[in-house]
Amino acid sequence: VRILYLGRLQDVAGTRAAQIDLPEGVATAEAVRTWLSREEPALGAALGDPSVRIVVNDAVARADHPVGPEDEIAFLPAVSGG
Amino acid sequence: MISVQEAPFDPGAEERRLAEACPGAGAIVSFTGLVRGRSGGADVAELELDHHPRFTEKVVREIAEEARARFSLLGVTIIHRYGRLNPGEAIVLAAAAAEHRRAAFEAVDYLMDRLKTEAPFWKREHGPDGSRWIEARPGDWTDRARWDRGT
């Protein structure tokens, strides 16, 4: 999957975009967040903030939204606005 | 016309384009937002805007459509830039065409209040003292709430 860290999350992640292979069993939006958080605890704290939304491809995803290898998963912190 | 783009735009030309696209309009109201050179008492050398490659434009489009329906607009233009901008540059244009002026004025006010609170942009100011991410001001949400009318 392709992961996008938008806004201030890119500073925590150290990158704005990453291509990663999900381990078997990580198949929902929330599972991706949990897995990334476990891999990198500092990032986990940032991703776990209740204001962070997950957008899969081009729509806000619920926690149980299924994700596969071709999907793009973006983590959106609170917006600055236009 | 809705556009989320890196390139600069010409507000005057966009307003004329909207007028030409809406021959029945009796009113065009246009707002152009510029990058400020000072923020919170500090100089800003550059404003960086991060955005989502598709979701940002989708949300902007939804806001435009809701304004069009709510104020019976004949046309709407929103252009919003991303990337790195210098003070004085136009960052956003919101324009509305309507039969009468009140709807056009209100629609642009509404568009900007929605954009300021909901448009998925993340701003980072770069200045002589480093850089910082900025968040929507509480006042932006108060402005936004004026349009709720309990709906």
Image (spheres, grey):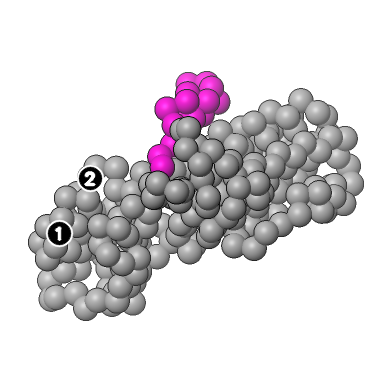
Q: Quadrant of the N terminus of chain B?
A: bottom right
Quick check: do tags 1 and 2 share a chain? yes
Which of B29/B70 is in front? B29
Residue B115 seen in this snapshot: no
What residue sits 39% from the left and 50% below the top? B130
Q: Which residues are the magenta region?
A: B133-151
Q: Which residue is mark 1?
A: A37
Type of amino acid at the residue the image marks with label 2: Asp
In the rendered image, the vertical position of residue B102 relative to residue A37, given as above or below: above
The picture places residue B51, in percent across and down from the top left corner, at: 47, 57
Q: Residues within 10 Å of mark 2 (few under 14, many from 20)?
A: few
**Residue A18 image-quadrant placement:** bottom left
The picture places residue B58, in percent across and down from the top left corner, at: 52, 55
What residue sits 75% from the left and 33% below the top? B104
In contact (CB < 8 Å): disc 1 and disc 2: no
Which of B13/B18 is in front? B13
